[in-house]
Amino acid sequence: MYSMKQIYSFYLFLVLILISTFSYSQGFQVNFQGQKQQAMGCAGTALQTDGASLFFNPGASAFAKENSVNVATTPIFANVMYIDSATNDVYRTENPVGTPFSAYGLFQLKEDGKLKLGIAAYTPFGSTVQWEKNWIGRFAITRLELKAIFIQPTISYRISDKIGVGAGFVYSTGNVNLQKDIPVQFEDGTFAKAELAGKAQGFGYNLGVQINATEKLGIGLNFRSKVQMNLDEGEATFTVPLGLDPNFPDGKFVGGLPLPQVTTLGLSYKLNDKWAFVLDINHVAWQAYDTLAFDYETNTESLLDTKSARDYKNIVAFRAGASYKVMKNLEVRFGGGYGLTPVQDGYVTPETPDGNRAYGTFGFGYELGEHFAIDASCYYTQITRADSNKETNLSGTFTTKAIAAGIGFIYKW
Amino acid sequence: MTRNILSIFTFSLLVVLTACKPKYEATTPEQGEMNPTRFVMIGGGHAGGYMDDALTYEGQTNSVANILAEQFKTIGGGFFNQPYVNQSSMGVSLAGLAPFKLGYKVDCKGDTSLSPVRIAAGGDLSVLNDNLYTASNKFGNFGIPGLKLMDVSNNAYANVNPFFKRMTSSTTSSVLDNVMGVNPTFFSIFLGIEDVMDYAKSGGKNNNLPSTANFESAYSNLVQVMTANGAKGVVATIPDVTQMPYFTTIPWNGLNLDSADNQTLNNIYNPINFFFEIGSNPFMIEDPAANDFGVRQILEGELLLLSVPLDSVKCNQMGVLFPLRTEFILTLAEISTLRNQIAAYNTIIKNIAIQNNLAIVETDKFAENLKDGFVYNGISMNAKFVSGGAYSLDGIHYNAKGNALLANEFIKAINTKYKSTMHQINAGNYDATLFP
């Protein structure tokens, strides 16, 4: 029989999946899948932490010593400011608070068994960008909402005391909703609008190897495949003057968005009983995002299929962090990272005004008895990017400030 | 312990959250070496806010002169007065007609389509009745519909142009007298379009293009007077008017023939060596020099004017059995005359500007860019009629958005010349064609 606590944890786990809406990030990749990692500069591929290792490295999960269920959420407060270079006008986003979440269940069939089974649900990509009313880039974008949830059943196996491997299958489902103004005016001067919405899904996998080379040194390798999110049954809705209705027929459209492949080499080093250090080097194959295309079922002279060049490039990011055990049940953590932007000059868009980014993090973990633990983290970054977009000729400087404060709960047995 | 940690965490969270909005540090625009305290602009309809073939309150508000004056205010410019049409008036055209708007029109075949239509049978002629001049609040915008460079010093001009008569200080004062009455500290000259428009709009019939010598002496005199008291200024070149939608909308080969019509026309015209085919064909036009019959097919590159009566073309064989009259056409020779003349005027304008150390706005480049098309903050702009975004429904004058874009060209030219740092305006907020 399940205990009440177990039932409650499982219930919470399900609820979080069901009510999941989440949002925001630059380059539309959200690196908030584990509170311990988040507090240590979002690194930790070579460290078996808790259920979050199912995402960071399914190979490390093979070294889990108990069953655990954990849930976490990380509200993101992100604000973008745009200063137009010609007019010096300033415009801001009014983004809703993003709430990426993660939920993990990691189970062993018998005590200290070599085989672990895991289920993970997390939100690694997405954003809601809402620009202020009548902003200068309204004909490029007024609102973009991306929601995607990844569900990843996983098997991990400890080959030896030193080597663990793991593999997860990823099913992803999500919604896209893109809104912009069309530079066509009603008789009262208001602008026409376009809304493109639809459900997308995709598949992928997550592979990991963990090598505990020595007592102190761990090496982790993780490969998360590209997930091509295909939107086959999009609905395009146009609010246009009656006289132009025939030019903008509502109808279906097809689109897609690649979520790139991520390869990570991680190192962990346990200096002593108190200090541990982690380092991750990510390679993100953003080159997959070369074009954003919309293929409308019904084309007219005014409504042609669009192919917007994005030409993202592959990037690397460095993330590092440390943890320090203050006392038996309290650990503090801190870290930071630096990531290059995948967005090349001439391709910065107001939906992902990305730039090279440095960030800092801190957090703590506190154990309440044998079964229960709380982890919290805080992340801060500021990004400034000046660019002139080749397609829209929007020319100005985007400044983004983002703070993400997360909290997670673990129940283990 | 846990409570302490949580409260410390919450506290630090609140601290960082308040710091979460990126900071904006405003910069103050500077006037540099120019002084916009008393600004005047002299020009034709394009400077005065004439659009949709009428002078209206709305159009004047969005005149290139007024948009510029608004930006001048950020660097010390004073109040800028215009001879406004009453806000409740529909306005009036040069020919006394009502302005255009985009509406539904039923053609001779009974087909309904979107088309520029006059908002009323006649314009509001009362606009031209009153004289609005007040000595205490002199006008800054001398963008007067129809004003030619050749007329700026004409003392009797108030009797010629009712749009000037309604704003002049006296019926015996010239436009230039009025302008100098303001004692301008900064001026803009946007003249020359009206000087070539008679010729262009009449299909070359009104052969009154000023000679380059006359143009040069008039322009030179004007600049001399304007700069006599040390005022600085900006001058605008003349766009190639043949790039305006008024001249480019009706295709030269818009005569579409089915097999029966094709047969009929070939039967009629083959004996005099004109041939037709099924599909698109050149229209038939009058050309006294062409042959004994004085007719020929229009050539590629020749322009049909928007004054062509389209119903007659669609239903009464105009352009087919009844060739289009020369007043509807700019022939290759006429186009080349017009372009050569504009190019010569522009050379004169630029030389005089350089000699007098004035800023230059190349509106000919602006019109050229529109013809080629460009994207402005996500808005596709081009020189297409109705949909192009910059020209009003008369196909000649810019709409509010076109004026705003052009005003930005003035701002750029002034900033460069006089080291001022005026900001440009967001032309995206200005109206283009409004659709029913």
Image (tube, grey):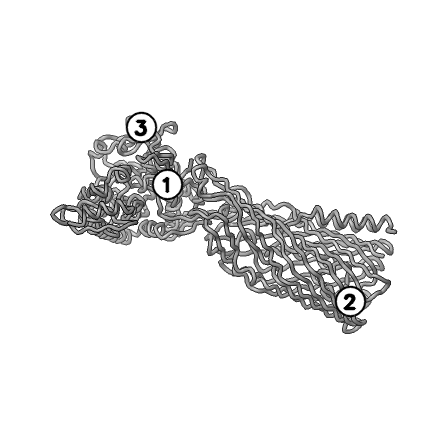
Q: Are marks 3 and 1 in contact (CB under 8 Å)?
A: no
Q: Let me know if residue A42 appears in the view.
A: yes
- Helix, strand, or loop for circle 3? loop
Q: CA distance from mark 3 to mark 2?
A: 86 Å
Q: Chain of mark 1?
A: B
Asked which secondary structure carries label 1, the reply is loop
In this orientation, which residue lies closer to the viewer: B131 or B400? B400
Q: Are marks 3 and 1 on the same chain?
A: yes
Residue A157 disc label: 2
> Mark 2, residues whose alpha carbon is within 10 Å: few (<14), some, or many (≥20)?
many
Residues packed near mark 1 inside 10 Å, few (<14), some (14 to 19) or many (20 plus):
many
Front residue of this view, candidates B28 and A187: A187
x%, y% of residue B432?
40, 41
Q: Identify the amino acid type marked 3.
A: Ala
Choose between B275 and A321: the one closer to the eye.
Answer: B275
How far across and how far down the image is residue B257, in percent? 28, 46
Q: Which residue is mark 1?
A: B399
Residue B121's disc number = 3
Select label 3 or label 1 by which is in front.
3
